[in-house]
Amino acid sequence: MLIFRFCEGNGRAKARVMETLRALVCGVVCAQLAAAPVGWAASETDKDKGSAANAGVETKKLGNDPVLKVMQMELSRANAELGKTEQAPYYLSYTIYDQDFVVLVGAYGSLLTDAAAKRRQADVTMRVGTPALDNTH
């Protein structure tokens, strides 16, 4: 009987410690999530300050982007080749969506799943005829 009561009390103490620890971890995670937008805003203002000084550098970076180069070459090729056809397009656009995303799933202060993925998707729009007959928008 005495041994049982001792174990019962020890289990309750352990449960209280675990509850306290869980609450502490949840509080830390909440504080990090609450402080994250402040850190992001500070980094955005730093970028805005340096953007005027780095405008030339960013233009050079875009000029060296291989995806942009391929898009420009394809646009000029398409204009040259499709302009020779009977129904030449009057509008041609290429859009590439380049996405990086992270999915985090958690419950009760623990991380259950984390996944990261990249996705690149192309969209081509071509309009044939005349702009007068265009009812796109």
Image (cartoon, grey):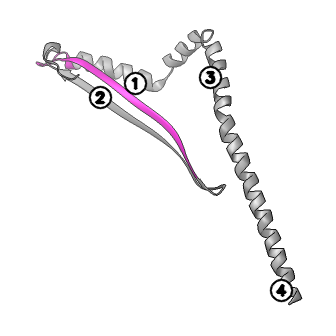
21 or 6: nearer the eye?
6
Viewer-nearest of discs 3 and 4: 4
Q: Which mark is residue 124?
A: 2
**Which segment is the magenta one?**
82-105
Q: How many other residues sit within 10 Å of disc 4, few (<14), some (14-19) or many (≥20)?
A: few
Answer with left or right where residue 74 lies relative to residue 84.
right
Q: How many other residues sit within 10 Å of disc 3, few (<14), some (14-19) or many (≥20)?
A: few
Q: Look at the image and say whether residue 103 sits in the magenta stretch.
A: yes
Viewer-nearest of discs 2 and 4: 4
Which of the two discs, 3 and 4, labels the residue nearer the N terminus? 4
The CA span between labels 2 and 4 is: 74 Å
Q: Quadrant of residue 44?
A: top right
What amino acid is labelled 2 in the image?
A: Val
Secondary structure of residue under mark 2: strand
Answer with left or right where residue 25 lies relative to residue 51.
right
Measuring 41% from the left and 32% from the top, which residue is drawn there? 97
Judged by its main secondary structure, the magenta piece is: strand
What amino acid is labelled 1 in the image?
A: Val
Percent of width and height locating residue 15: 77, 68
The CA span between labels 1 and 3 is: 30 Å
Which quadrant holds the C terminus? top left
Residue under label 1, please give it.
70
